[in-house]
Each structure stands twice: as C-alpha cells, then as structure tokens.
Amino acid sequence: MKTWRRFFIVSAITASLFVASSHASLFAADIEDLKSKIADRNSAIEALEAEIAGYQADLDKVGKQSKSLQSAITTINLQKKKLETDIKLTENRVEAVNLTIKELSLDISDKSDLISTNIQAMGETVKSLDRMETTSLLVILLKHETLSALWDGIDNLERFEVQVQSELHRVRELKTGLETQKTATEAKQRELTALRSRLSDQKQILTSNKNEQNRLLSATKNKESEYKKVLAQKVALRDSFEREMLEFESQLKFEIDPTRLPSIGKGVLNWPLDKIRLTQEFGDTSFAKSGAYNGKGHNGVDFAASIGTPVRAALSGVIKGTGDTDTVCRGASYGKWIMIEHGNGLSTLYAHLSLIKVTEGQEISTGQIIGYAGNTGYSTGPHLHFTVYATQGVKILDRKSAVCKGTYTMPIADLKAYLDPLEYL
C-alpha cells in the first residue's frame, strides 16, 4: 500500500524540484560584467609589463656606456619612469584582484541561494511524503478520475526517484564548489594585502629615486667635470674603507667548527630573487683582481636586479640585524643591508637595497619578501649583493671608522667565515 501512496506525491513535488533545478543565477549579468572588467585589467597589465620591459632594455643599454653625468641622469630618469610604471602595474593588479574577489563573492552568494532553494524543495518533498503516508488508499483512488491516470503515476515513480537522487548529488556538488570558492576568496584576499603593501613600498622607493636625482644634481652642479670629481672621490672612499675593513677582519680569530655547517649541495639555500642573472661570482674575480676589494676577493655574489625588485629570504630564520652604511659613509660599502641567521649554521647578507621590510629579531620564512634591490652603498649599478657566512664567524658590530669619521653598524666576519654562495644555492 505504501507504493500506491508514494506515487501520488510525484505531481506535487516534481514541481518544487523543477523550480530548484531550473534556478537561474540572480547575479549572472553582474558576473559577466565583472569578467569583462577583469579581462580589460589583464590587457592593461600586459601592456604595462611590455612598457616596463622596454625601460629595462634601455637601462641595460645605458649601463654599458661609459660613466658620465649624462648617462647617470639618463639612468635615474629611466629608473623613475620604470618605477612609476611599476606603480601603475601594481595598481592595476590590485584592481584586478578586487574585481576577482567581487566575482567570487557573487558566485558564492549564487551557490548559497541555489543550495538553499534545493534544500527547501527537498524539505517540502519529505513533508509531502510524510503526509501521503498517512492518507488512506480509498482517498488516493478517489483523487484520480481514471485507472489509466493511476498507472501513469506509478510509471513516473521510478523516474521521480532518480530525479531526487540527482538533486541530492547536485546539492553535494554545490557545497563542494562553495568551499572551493571560499578558499579561492581567502587566497585572493591575501594576495590583495600583499599587493597593497608592495604598492606602498614602490611609492617609497620612487621618492628615494627622486631624492637621489636631486642629490646628484646638487653635488655635481650639473657639470661633467664635477661629476668626474664626485666619482673619483667615491672610488677613493670605497678603497680606503675596504682597506680599513680588511685590516680589521684579518685580525679576527673566531672559532669556526666545520662540522656545524651543512653539507655543500644545491638547494640548501633558495635563490633570493625570482629571476636570476649572475653578474659577479665569489672570490678572486676579474673585478676583484682589479683591486676593487684590496686583494681579499669578492665576499659574495652579485645578481642583476633593477631598483624595486623584491628580495626574498634564502631560508627561514631570524633577522639578526639591518642597517644603512650610507648614513655614516655614503657610497663606501653595503648601503642598506639585512642579515639573517638560519638554523643550519649559515647566515646570509643582502646588500645595496633600496628598501628594508624587516626588523631585528623578526622571524621570517623561506621566500618571504624582506626588502627590495637597489643601488645604495658602493654600487656601479643596481644589483643585489648576496653573502653567505658561517654563523660562528660573523658578528654585527658598531665600529668607529677613521675613514668615515663616524660609527657604522654592519656585519664583520673572520675571513674564514666567508663561504661561496653558489655551493649552497
């Protein structure tokens, strides 16, 4: 008798399931509009990336020219244009992510409404089943005008049950999709936070670039002869400072236990930049042999990096210290620097930065942005200087300098503590 009762509710509840399954997105037009706007932003991003690549190509050409006041001014102007375009690019990325978050939010609302509609429809179905279970067979028979109509209902029962199962499956899929969209939204929110932070950083770097141009014009009085004097003074100061450092570091006798260092091998440290182009290796390079480091060799490696390029931690660790040698001895040493102590017996230094993003004592993760590449300190062009130390052999010291007539803060190491970064990267 239950079978006879069940088929009578088919006509009553099929309608409700039909409403649920034919649910049209309330936000379809809005979502399509957002997709169109996102596509426009992505096109703008591609155009800006091409413009930035053009500025970088021009900077590379100027960098190969002989040093002159005109080339220095041209370089700073190109850097300024590139930084301004970098800012536009980040602004467009921020807006693209904002639009994507809005699209995801509408899609989440749409799925939530559809789930609610389906659940409500199936709820009504269950109620109808309960009501029909209490209806007598005589009443059921009297509700149909002919026996043929009765048999048609029975034939539809199997198809109806399949439809119910289909709707249940659909609800499960919608719930899975909803969770996926929520996860994607959270990821985009994190990306948005990072982009807004980078935008703020880029504006600070642009301000520094403008200040550097003003400083150059003021120091040279816009004359080539004055520029040559400034350049010569900078080289002389660098050489004197390097001699002073070499004399001091040569006297250091820190005890270094090799067994506390990780085994040499690729991947012990991650690359500190997203794109790698090595411009100077470790040790007695041709530039070092020219007398650049007073005979002690290059104490790290150099990577090409335009001003404002994100610099990442090569490994998790603790920020041992940060500083800026230009505050005491402009153009003589590392400029803005960061040192990280890692848990494997190594410490790493990142120098010539345009902006520092971390503070002493801060714990950082592998790949985290800690600063941005620049041209501070003694630098023949924008790049990242990367040094690897045996942690036991390096300390951050405040030291008075006869050359610089002041007290500078920077890492000082036993010469044996300098390790070849390429053996660990």
Image (cartoon, grey):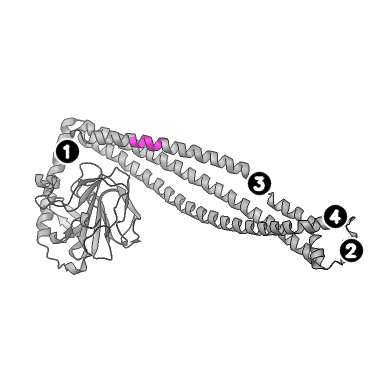
Residue, disc 4? 149
Q: Nearer the viewer, residue 203 or 372?
A: 372
Taking the magenta stretch, the answer to whether it contains residue 174 is no
What is the span of residues highlighted in magenta in the rendered image?
47-53
Where residue 154 appears, as percent x and y from the top left, is: 79, 59
**Mark 4 or mark 3, earlier in chain:** 3
Q: Quadrant of the N terminus?
A: bottom right
Q: CA distance from mark 1 to mark 3?
A: 68 Å
Q: Nearer the viewer, residue 347 or 320?
A: 347
| Horizontal relation, residue 41 to residue 276: left or right | right
**Mark 4 or mark 2, earlier in chain:** 2
Q: Which circle, 4 or 2, is nearer the viewer?
A: 4
Q: Is residue 396 visible?
A: no
Residue contact at pointers 4 and 2, CB within 8 angstroms: no
Where residue 128 appears, as percent x and y from the top left, is: 78, 62
Q: Residues within 10 Å of mark 3 (few under 14, many from 20)?
A: some
Provide the secondary structure element on which disc 1 rests: helix
Residue, disc 3? 26
Q: CA distance from mark 4 to mark 3?
A: 38 Å
Q: Residues within 10 Å of mark 1 (few under 14, many from 20)?
A: some
Q: Magenta region's main secondary structure?
A: helix
Taking the magenta stretch, the answer to whether it contains residue 52 is yes
Residue, disc 1? 230
Q: Which circle, 4 or 1, is nearer the viewer?
A: 4
Three-letter residue code for mark 2: Val
Q: Residues within 10 Å of mark 4 (few under 14, many from 20)?
A: few
Is 282 drawn above or below residue 55 in the view shown?
Answer: below
Where residue 399 appears, as percent x and y from the top left, is: 17, 58
Residue, disc 2? 139
Three-letter residue code for mark 4: Ala
